[in-house]
Image: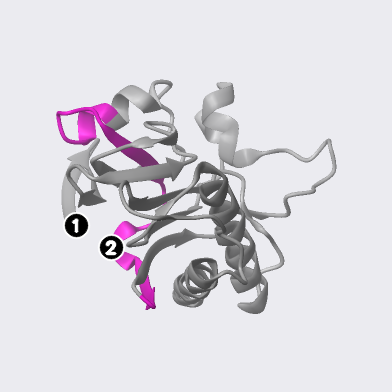
Amino acid sequence: MKLAYRVEDGVRLGSLLWEFGPGWRMISSALLGGGIGARTWVLNAQVVAGYSRMDPVDHLRELGPDDGLGIGMMTAASVERYARAVDGEVEVVATVGLRVPTWAAAPEDTTDPELAPMLGEPAAARPPVGTINLMAVMPVAMTDAALVNAVMTMTEAKSQALIEAGFPCTGTASDALCLAVRADGPEELFGGPRSTWGARLARAVHSAVHQGAASWRPRT
């Protein structure tokens, strides 16, 4: 993982880049490169609060390596304050921003301020965004079903960590994640929290998110 900086509109912003090369398969909810498939890099790019560009996918392509076979996530959280946890060869890095926490099952008329830039609302109407982005790496192969199961596990562990850290929420409205696993070898069939690798993943996500939430709180 590499931490690099750039300046946009006079603001110093950071990015985290993982360069895997061939031999990896990933599942992600990211705008760029999301879904399931072979990927060679992952970018977690910090953007300004009240992000207003209407071409986020193109923006991520500009910021990432040139080969175009990667995954790109965005956050307004300070990526240099990332939290890292390791459990049984599973590694998780979390960038945590909680300025606009939310419950997943909110009332229908609840305003979604973090998605305001995509809806074209005036910049003055948008609060600063946060976002919790998760990057996880496991040294095993998994079936597609196990990958989906693992995403459920990551999300559940994230929500558990936030609630235990004292935040009444399940996350933010713009959270994203990526899980990288090996492309070759015997495939794990399960990714739930009581499976061998799912349990390790859950504990690592929980630890990283809890760290990130605890370190974010003093700044509020």
Q: Which residue is mark 2?
A: 80
Report the amino acid beneath label 2.
Glu
Q: Are marks 1 and 2 in contact (CB under 8 Å)?
A: yes
- As measured in the structure, the alpha-carbon distance from the residue carrying label 1 to the one carrying label 2 is 7 Å
Whether residue 26 is visible, yes or no, is yes
Secondary structure type for disc 1: strand
Residue 212, picture quadrant: bottom left
Which residue lies at the image location 54% right of the left edge and 34% below the top edge? Answer: 124
Q: Please determine whether, in this image, residue 20 is positioned above or below residue 155.
A: above
x then y, percent, for residue 210 = 52, 75
Say few, some or many: other residues with alpha carbon within 10 Å of mark 2 (under 14 / 14 to 19 / 20 or more).
some
x then y, percent, for residue 125 = 59, 34
Say few, some or many: other residues with alpha carbon within 10 Å of mark 1 (under 14 / 14 to 19 / 20 or more).
few
Q: Please determine whether, in this image, residue 202 is positioned above or below residue 71.
A: below
Which residue lies at the image location 65% right of the left edge and 78% below the top edge? Answer: 164
Taking the magenta stretch, the answer to whether it contains residue 133 is: no
Q: Nearer the viewer, mark 1 or mark 2?
A: 1
Report the amino acid beneath label 1.
Leu
| Magenta residues, start to end | 61-88
Taking the magenta stretch, the answer to whether it contains residue 75 is: yes
Q: Please determine whether, in this image, residue 49 is positioned above or below residue 78.
A: above
Identify the mark at residue 3; answer none if there is no mark.
1
Whether residue 121 is visible, yes or no, is no
x then y, percent, for residue 102 = 68, 53
Identify the mark at residue 190; answer none if there is no mark.
none
Which residue lies at the image location 31% right of the left edge and 22% below the top edge? Answer: 58
